[in-house]
Image: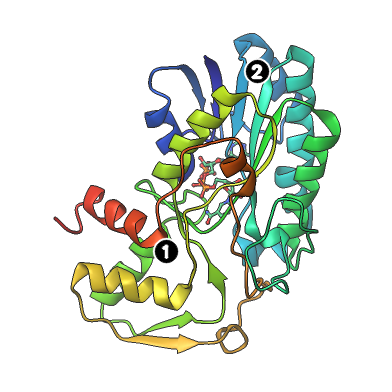
Amino acid sequence: MKIVLIGADGQLGSDLLKTLGEDDVLPLYYPKFDITEPEKCRSVVLGLAPEVVINTAAYHRVDECEDHPKESFQVNAIAVRDLALVCREIDASLVHFSTDYVFDGAKRSPYLEDDPPNPLSVYAVSKLAGEFFVRQVLKKYFLVRTCGLYGVAGSKEKGTNFVERIVELNRAGTILRIVNDQWVTPTSTQELAQRISELIRSRHYGLYHLTNEGECTWYSFARQVFSLLGEEARLVSVDSLTYGAKARRPLYSVLENKRAKEIGLKGFSPWNEALKDYLLVKGHIR
Ligand SMILES: NC(=O)c1ccc[n+]([C@@H]2O[C@H](COP(=O)([O-])OP(=O)(O)OC[C@H]3O[C@@H](n4cnc5c(N)ncnc54)[C@H](OP(=O)(O)O)[C@@H]3O)[C@@H](O)[C@H]2O)c1
């Protein structure tokens, strides 16, 4: 399959590049390829003539997005629409990623694909706008909402991932204040990349929730990291209000992989098993 991969050196992008090794993958890198430059973007994608375009690019420093709504919409919505229009022109399907943050958390049980979104932050509103553009422009799309990604490459936008950040800070002797009232499912980009590889071959287009199984707070996730590492850590459980992040986050954003299960996609492992695999691959444990 001829696949254009946007953001190929990102956290998810680099695992997709590895996983799709049997395919004819054409990786594109920022800033040489910038999705916010519609003319250049169109001519590059038309020239490559892929069957599938995978877009991992996003402006997703969530707190920073609060002060930069224009930039958030430019990358997460307008550029996504432009990309969708190019895909329609060449009859390619588009794989695009969205977020658990499109929900407000009020439901308190795992969100299904058809639950109504109610985003709480600029980032989440811009990602939801991107979703709507994909659905408005295209029929052949895979829109994938996922949650709390961590992968060997680390998030390029954020400089690292949650696991590496807390390990590094702990080893530097820092007391770690971690929120204990936001329920999520941390998700391994390695596993997500494998499921994406399956999904694009299924041709069951539409909106999907794809995360590891189970749920935890960021605090309990951190505890599990140090327990698996066998390291002492000074963790302080705080609530979101006390933590005081600029952007509001849902207090519950666990996603149910309902449609993936319906189409028979291979199941995800529980988040704690995926974490252990990650620590092994990263060489943190043996
Ligand atoms: N990380 C999470 O916890 C999380 C949770 C839910 C959903 N998501 C979604 O999952 C997707 C992948 O996330 P990730 O963690 O893999 O992100 P990432 O590591 O930051 O990777 C994003 C990639 O896109 C590139 N990029 C940024 N702006 C671009 C632009 N204007 N044009 C072209 N490329 C651009 C980045 O390059 P540079 O770094 O060089 O700018 C990077 O290679 C995103 O859509 C994100 O919103 C992420």
Q: Do the residues labelled 1 and 2 touch (CB within 8 Å)?
A: no
Where residue 119 sits: x, y (%)?
A: 76, 63
Residue at which label 2 appears:
45
What's the residue type where badge 2 is placed? Val
Left or right, 52 with reference to 193: right
Query: Which residue is pictured at 69% across the width and 18% down the height?
Result: 92
Query: Which residue is pictured at 73% across the width and 74% down the height?
Result: 106
Instruction: Report the disc number at residue 281.
Output: none
Q: Which of 161 and 237 is in front in this view?
A: 237
Q: How far apart are marks 1 and 2 (CA)?
A: 33 Å
Where residue 124 sits: x, y (%)?
A: 72, 59
Query: Which residue is pictured at 73% across the width and 66% down the height?
Result: 121
Circle 1 — which element?
helix
Q: Image quarter for residue 252?
A: bottom right
Does label 1 point to a residue whose CB lies under 8 Å from ligand 1? yes
Query: Which residue is pictured at 72% across the width and 31% down the height?
Result: 37
Residue at which label 1 appears:
162
Where residue 277 sits: x, y (%)?
A: 28, 52
Residue 211 seen in the figure: yes
In the picture as drawn, the residue positioned furthest to the left comes out as 286
Q: Is residue 232 above or below residue 120?
A: below
In the picture as drawn, the residue positioned furthest to the right comes out as 136
Left or right, 205 with reference to 199: right
- Which of the two discs, 1 and 2, labels the residue nearer the N terminus? 2
Residue 9 seen in the figure: no
Q: Quadrant of the C terminus?
A: bottom left
Q: Which of 257 and 161 is in front in this view?
A: 257
Circle 2 — which element?
helix
* Rendering quadrant holding ligand 1: top right
Q: Image quarter for residue 259?
A: top right
What's the residue type where badge 1 is placed? Phe
